Image: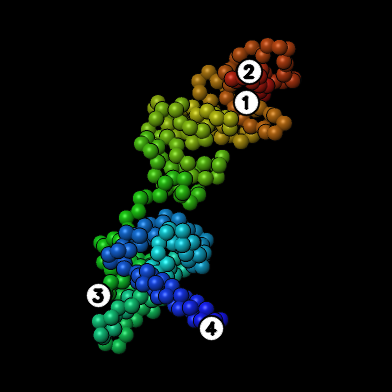
Amino acid sequence: MRRRRLAGLLGLLLQLAATRAVLAQPCDPMNADAAAIAAARAAADAACDCNRPGQNHGEYVRCTMAAIDGSGLRRECRGALKRCYARSTCGRAGFVTCCRTRASGVTSCTIKPDAAHCTAPQGGSACAGAYATCCDACTSMGCTPTTTTTTTMPPPTCASGPFPDCGGTCGAGEACFASPLSAACECFPDGTQPCGDSRYPVCNGTCPANEQCGLLSVLGGCGCVPAGTTPCGEAGGACGLGSCPTGQECGLLSTPALTYCTCAPAGVPCCAGGVSCGPGQVCSVAPGLCLCFPP
């Protein structure tokens, strides 16, 4: 009886294995699995930047492996796609993809330290590929022409750009700048707007002739000052050298946490409420503040 049960169990396991083998169809990259492979490639390309500064090859490959595993691509297709990304120049400065075609007409892709090491096999030919990965570099005839594209990716957004270079896309009327406040790339007005409509801390708007747009205070605010001068908010601690719009003056403001230069209306009487300034100082008013300036 026990032998019969074991035989029956073995038969069931063999049947399940055969069923699983039938269900696990081989990868079909040209037809049934083409769309899923394209989606997995798009996910890997979006998540992993081949040209990220300071990145090594292992970091790039691990990133692509994780993206492919999370893309929903069938297991039967993942291995080939992962090998495709592993054979790349990403994170390898100076390396090239090399397409080597044997005398029999079979082309293979390898990674070489430079183009000089991409040599032809006996009776065959070789060329350095124009693309970073073996996914794209070679065809069955040799190197993929540079006019051929495989996956069209949208340009990177501003926020995803490498700080402080920044060069991603923004909306209409905006441009991508490095923000010293967030230490990241952000979209700011592109400079075609009036100076007063600039967004702190990027003062890049338009001004009348012989004037320039500058930062009036580290608290915010952009305004037009005489051309060739240093705007008050950019004067550091030398407030006497800072410039302000007509009718305002540049002075020093000290708080427990910060000391900086800022513009305030010139000649305004001392603040109400009994606030007075020290000897040799004059009182002026900025929005919500009472400021004591050197005379």
Q: Amino acid at mark 2?
A: Ser
Q: Earlier in the sequence, mark 4 or mark 1?
A: 4
Q: Amino acid at mark 4?
A: Arg
Circle 2 residue: 284
Instruction: Measure how far apart labels 3 and 2 are at the Cα level.
Output: 78 Å
Q: Is residue 201 above or below residue 118?
A: above
Q: Earlier in the sequence, mark 3 or mark 1?
A: 3
Disc 1 and disc 2 in contact, CB within 8 angstroms: yes
* Image coords of residue 214 (percent x, y): 50, 32
Q: Is residue 23 above or below residue 238?
A: below
Q: Which mark is residue 141?
A: 3
Q: Amino acid at mark 3?
A: Met
Q: Earlier in the sequence, mark 2 or mark 4?
A: 4
Instruction: Measure how far apart labels 2 and 4 are at the Cα level.
Output: 102 Å
Residue drawn 57% across the image and 18% down it = 265
Q: Toward which corner of the image does residue 261 lie, by quadrant?
A: top right
Q: Which mark is residue 251?
A: 1
In this view, the mark in front (4 or 1): 4
Q: Nearer the viewer, residue 37 or 144?
A: 37
